[in-house]
Amino acid sequence: MAAHSSFAARTYRVDAVVLRTHKLGEADRIITLLTSDHGQIRAVAKGVRRTSSKFGGRLEPFMVSDLQLVAGRTLDIISQAVTKSSYGQSIAAHYDRYTVATAMAETAEKLTDADSESAGAQYRLLVGALAALSRGDHAAELILDSYLLRSLATAGWAPSFDACARCGATGPHTAFSAALGGAVCHDCRPPGSPSPSVETMRLLAALLSGDWAVADVSEPANRREAAGLVASFVQWHLERNVRSLRLVERN
């Protein structure tokens, strides 16, 4: 009875999205999860690599599931998994969607690795982005850049694409500094700062705010220029590369 009581006390349920998996031993996997209430969790799914596994495909990347876990000394153990949203299959069927989802998951993992305060908001943001990606609501590259900007804003690094990020002077401005936080005026512009077009800055503002009427009709050249600025902004604030971004195809 005491053992059963102890087991029950260590059991909890969470909604979680699978960020990444890697092999453990001959049949198990370690699953990196972003949860709605407990931040980022690394847990073991025992026997998941066997064809007879009770988990099936419910613990593959980009799947959203209702999980039951048992707290362990080092890693928690997943004991049950019920699918809530099956995004993985439709995303994996399209290379562009798959690479974008991988980049989003890597970013979410890096952002929530040490920041538990914004983890709940990051969970909701990622699930929403994966849902839009799986449906093909917008171009995959636009969903990615919108997600990256919003995830950094949620973490406390909201960029400015109108007022000068340093002095607050009213825009629009035609210079960008990742280090200073976005658009910068002529007086605040650091030497060597890129000078994106007004249309590119407008696209960036639309991606951050979710103005898809503007983003969806943007020109390929502006999308490419915006993507480079977003990547530099992400790298500056994360202080490390998001390696999966290199795999994303840009039209």
Image: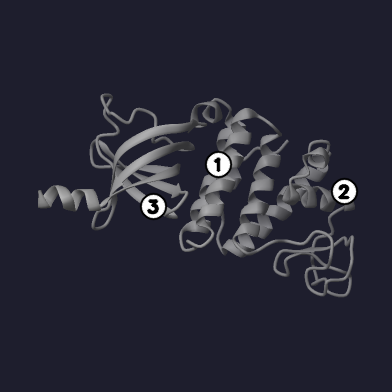
Q: Position of residue 250 (x, y in %)?
A: 70, 39
Q: Is residue 157 visible?
A: yes
Nearer the observer: mark 2 or 1; the answer is 1
Q: Name the residue rendered at 77%, 51% in the picture.
A: 204
Mark 2 highlights which residue? 199
- Picture coordinates of residue 79 (x, y %)? 27, 40
Q: CA distance from mark 3 to mark 1?
A: 16 Å
Circle 2 crowding by C-alpha within 10 Å: few under 14, some 14–19, many from 20: some
Above or below residue 134? Residue 36 is: below
**SS for tag 1?**
helix
**At label 3, which amino acid type do we have?**
Ile
Q: Which residue is mark 1?
A: 127
Residue placed most toward the observer, 34 or 50: 34
How far across and down, in percent of the image, does residue 26 sit? 23, 37
> Which residue lies at the image location 69% right of the left edge and 47% below the top edge?
146
Q: Residue lying furthest left in this view?
A: 1
Q: Residues within 10 Å of mark 1 (few under 14, many from 20)?
A: many
What amino acid is at disc 2? Glu
Q: Mark 3 — residue?
A: 41
Q: Is 121 on the left or on the right of 82, as rendered?
A: right
Q: CA distance from mark 2 to mark 3?
A: 40 Å
Q: Which numbered disc, 3 or 1, marks the residue that appears first in the sequence?
A: 3
